Image (spheres, helix red, strand yellow):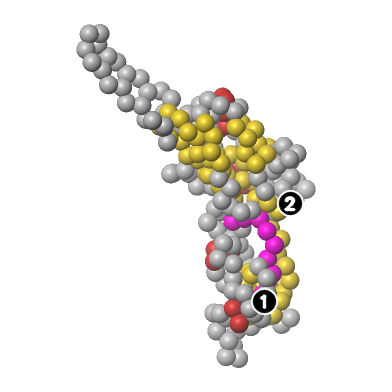
Amino acid sequence: LTISTGDMIAFVQNNCGLDDRDPSFASDAYHALSYSASLGSWVVTLSATETGGTSRGGVWYMCHCAVGAGSTCSTAADFATAAGKLTVYGPSPASQDHTCKAGASCQLAFTGQRLTTSDRLFFVDHSTGICGASAADLNVGGGSTHALSADFTLSLGAADLPQGGKWKICYCPDDSGPDFFCGDNGPSDFGMLAGVLTVLGPAPNSQHFACVAGFSCTVVILGEQLSR
């Protein structure tokens, strides 16, 4: 396979030249090859943030397009040459959502590509947190990292879920090298968004009110999806 500056790679799920790039992977984009002098090879770099390239586990065909000779490298038909396969370890799909109740134990189950008991995850605030950038939220799971059990589940105790709310599940597949351990590099190791955890119940868990004896009193309880 001859490669030149300007050539592109597409990641597809089935057939080069027939199927277009997978919109759920590699930022839904075609990727230009660049030459790395240090590696002596042509490379494509995929980002590790929750909206970036390696956003979920799975297997993809790498399809090559040679720029020039009438090719614009802009349609599936332009990427007809197979260059190989890319396997990404980690949870798949990236929308493994779970619902629990505040103050009650709960089990989360995960599926994916080559999950292991060395994998780790933690939770960040759904509104403000970013997997790969934000630290674990203290309001769920004690703000700690958690390992999967042998059946690829995570058991959270009542104390891990003290209040209602929504959190992103940030995942680290611990298969990046013999000297790698999830968390060595801080939150940046947890750039894979595995889904959303919704905890039903009052939030925050410190809603204090004062009433006066002999007078009517209205207490308004806030929380996540409270039932009537």
- Magenta span dominant secondary structure: strand
Of 228 and 36, nearer the camera is 228
Residue at screen point 60% across, 42% down: 186
Q: Residue furthest bottom?
A: 69
Amino acid marked by disc 1:
Cys
Indicate whether residue 63 is drawn in magenta: yes
Q: Please provide the residue range marked out in magenta.
A: 55-64
Q: Is residue 121 left or right of residue 140?
A: right
How packed mark 1 is, by other alpha carbons closer than 10 Å (few <14, some 14-19, many 20 or more), is many
Q: Position of residue 66 (x, y in %)?
A: 64, 83
- Cβ–Cβ below 8 Å for labels 1 and 2? no
**Res 37 label:** none
- Asked whether 20 or 7 is in front, the reply is 20
Identify which amino acid the numbered label 2 is placed on. Answer: Arg
Q: Is residue 34 above or below residue 187?
A: below
Considering the image in quadrants, where does the C terminus appear?
A: top left
Q: Name the residue beneath numbered marker 2.
A: 114
Q: Find residue 48 and report its image quarter.
A: bottom right
| Distance of label 1 from label 2 (alpha carbons) | 25 Å
10 Å crowding of disc 2: few (<14), some (14-19), many (20+)? some
State the image quarter where residue 34 is shown.
Answer: bottom right
Image side of residue 70 versus residue 175, left or right: left
Residue 98 higher or lower than 2, as above or below: above
- In the image, what residue occupies the spot 53% across and 29% down? 161
Total marks shown come to 2
Residue picked out by circle 1: 16
Q: Secondary structure at mark 1?
A: loop
